[in-house]
Amino acid sequence: MHTLSVRELGDALRRKEFSSVELTRHFLARIEQYDSEINAFITPTADIALAEAERADIRIREGDDSPLLGIPIAHKDIFCTQGVRTSCASKMLDRFVAPYDATVVERLRAAGAVMLGKTNMDEFAMGSSNQTSHYGAVSNPWDPTCVPGGSSGGSAAAVAAGLCPLATGTETGGSIRQPASLCGLTGLKPTYGRVSRFGMIAFASSLDQAGLMARSAEDIALSFAAMSGHDPKDSTSASEPVEDYPAALQGDLKGLRIGVVRDQFGAELDERIGSRVQEAISLLESLGAELCDIALPDCALSIPVYYVIAPAEASSNLSRFDGIRFGHRAQDPEDIEDLYMRSRSEGFGAEVKRRIMIGTYVLSAGYYDAYYLKAQQLRRRIADDFARAFEKVDILAGPTSPMTAFPIGEKMDDPVAMYLCDIYTSGINLAGIPALSVPAGFVDGLPIGLHLMGNHFSEGRLLKVAHHYQRSSDWHRRSPPAFA
């Protein structure tokens, strides 16, 4: 069952080849058997999953043919889930049980998806390798000595290992696409505002966006509409109508204009990855797409801009975790100042503290204009780079990550080297546009990704291109041998 796609699982459920309860038990058994090897889950929810599967079976017997009905899913542990621990992989929220569901969780449950559990992640989504979790690093199923990418590494590892067919993730600077690339998955980061952020614990509010990881673009197309659309509980939620994503997969690629981002094939890119990505782009050309070179000169500034804006917003968002209202509380404080200081010092890990301090610094008097205001001005220039590019082409293409998965422990003492893992992805979040990572081959036995980028609300077009690429390749069908 774990080798079947979301569409194949849905078809089998409707043909009564197996029930949702049987399917759910299968994935729960795989979690119990394999998760100790990769540490993808923080909180499995077997009882909830089986109850939801029973309800799904009733709906199926009554003739409901919703595409997600009875399909197991895992949620990144940044989404609030009523009655279930929501930790953000932090000691600060280790005992926090959410009193309500995030809109994403609520909508996917209403569509009939079955929640298997909450997945591991970088603490408060701060990291590019899933090594900053309070619950330990996640291992990449393709090589357990390597990272899966972050911050949604638990979701990526769970799907890659066949512990679930579909998982939610979140992005601030590449945290869906980068782990999708390193784990050989398809990962979609939507347009900012396409998916509600209500109940998604905030890191950087102007950058955060929820998305999905699965094996194929078709799986995401079948699932994405269920979580998308305007939410009156989120003031940044867009009112743009939700597209029929499965229908958008139809047609061919003839006449589609693809801009190849030549700036991203420089010295920082492993040339073997560059060759695989070029081969993938050539395949798209053979399917009818037209290629041209595109320059994004200001996108080279994405990393420094991101690491001013994101920490600034994080320092504000995380100020609520003070040891008084909720979250970790230091024992036997001497006074209120000691309570604040020790609660936050004990509750937050090193990377979170680093970003809070950077953010506080760039927002402080005397430095706001020099750093934060300047970063916002450069953010506008980066967005303009993309806008000019989309006047000439329909989508952009390049590598997702400059490297394959690296060994656990590597780069932990060099934050700048770690931050550069997101060199090709963070500009997308600054501009608020959608992007997709697609499996495009292997280097030294580890997956690499093709990065497809589109204009605002062009998720359907991106999924169509990825779908046609996957109909002509089989990289997305490969599974780690140890978890086959």
Image (cartoon, rainbow, N blue to C red):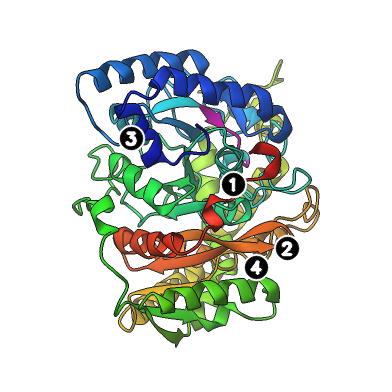
Amino acid type, callout 1: Ser
Query: Mark 4 against mark 3, which lies toward the viewer?
Result: 3
Q: Nearer the viewer, residue 34 or 129?
A: 34
Q: Quadrant of the C terminus?
A: top right
The answer to whether 115 is drawn above or below residue 231 in the figure is above
What's the residue at 38%, 25% (across, down)? 17
Write down the quadrant of residue 308 in the picture. Answer: bottom right
Amino acid type, callout 4: Pro
Question: Which type of secondary structure does the marked residue at label 2 adopt?
Answer: helix
Write down the quadrant of residue 66 in the picture. Answer: top left
What's the residue at 57%, 23% (across, down)? 43
The answer to whether 418 is drawn above or below residue 75 in the figure is below
Write down the quadrant of residue 307 in the picture. Answer: bottom right
Query: Mark 3 against mark 1, which lies toward the viewer?
Result: 3
Task: Work out how far the residue at label 4 is from the one at label 1, CA to CA, in angstroms.
Answer: 17 Å
Amino acid type, callout 3: Asp
Q: Earlier in the sequence, mark 2 or mark 3?
A: 3
Q: Which residue position is annotated with label 2?
A: 417
* Residue contact between numbered discs 2 and 4, judged by CB atoms under 8 Å: no
Q: Earlier in the sequence, mark 4 or mark 3?
A: 3
Question: Which type of secondary structure does the marked residue at label 1 adopt?
Answer: loop
Q: Which residue position is annotated with label 3?
A: 11
Q: Which residue position is annotated with label 4?
A: 402
Q: Which residue position is annotated with label 1?
A: 151
Amino acid type, callout 2: Ala
> How many residues crowd mark 4 within 10 Å: few (<14), some (14–19), many (20+)?
many
